[in-house]
Image (cartoon, coloured by chain):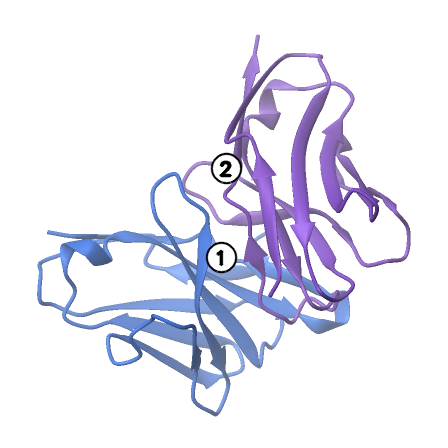
Chain colours: A purple, B blue
Amino acid sequence: AQSVTQLGSHVSVSEGALVLLRCNYSSSVPPYLFWYVQYPNQGLQLLLKYTSAATLVKGINGFEAEFKKSETSFHLTKPSAHMSDAAEYFCAVSESGFGNEKLTFGTGTRLTIIP
Amino acid sequence: GAVVSQHPSWVICKSGTSVKIECRSLDFQATTMFWYRQFPKQSLMLMATSNEGSKATYEQGVEKDKFLINHASLTLSTLTVTSAHPEDSSFYICSAPRRELATQYFGPGTRLTVL
């Protein structure tokens, strides 16, 4: 079975500071990994996905994530936080990168931006 | 703009009544849709996979007679919560994979409150 673990249910950073949200995965097959963002009372929006093409994945809104097999990690980063980045972030894993398989989500990390 | 819609966005009902939630893919066809449930400040948990023209596949522990899923067309899946109870109060989110883009799109969610 596949799973993801997000370390830190709450992360606070100052505006302009580095954002680092942690995600570790467990998978018996090569994983396909995703980061989604959820704003209050809304659905999820895909930030980026790893499908084995490149270990460093760039997404929308200036976010990127690096797949590290040796560390079984897929941490999300952004060099400079913006107030609009305040939201809930979910790491997810699936067995395919085709987008048509069910996703297993982590518990989420709430990101707060301090002005 | 949104590519997956849900209706209603919120609903309040009395205990014992049934509630139907619709999930529509707006500009693409989806032979598969997924239904998730999200409790407050928790992650998304997959409830079932909706398959157009055939029976839904339910995750372990989800009562199929309580959460009826119908995927009658390539753009519409419905989730009916039958004989709702307060413990069914939750945020229900659907998603639809768009194969040619290898991406799942999520609906904005439906907040169900059972009194």
Which residue corresponds to mark 2?
A: A39
| Residue A39: percent from left, percent from top | 50, 37
Residue A54 as seen in the image, left or right of residue A10: right
Residue B47 as seen in the image, left or right of residue A109: left
The residue furthest right is: A54
| Residue A42: percent from left, percent from top | 46, 44
Residue at position x 10%, y 51% from top? B115
Q: Quadrant of residue A7?
A: top right
Which residue corresponds to mark 1?
A: B107
| Amino acid type for the residue under numbered disc 2 | Tyr
Q: Which type of secondary structure does the marked residue at label 1 adopt?
A: loop
Residue at position x 50%, y 43% from top? A107
Instruction: Relative to A69, say whether B49 is above or below.
Output: below
Pick the quarter of the image with the C terminus of chain A: top right
Chain to which the residue tagged by mark 2 belongs: A
Q: Is residue B27 visible?
A: no
Instruction: Relative to A41, say whether B36 is above or below.
Output: below
Given residues A66 and B83, the one toward you in this image is A66
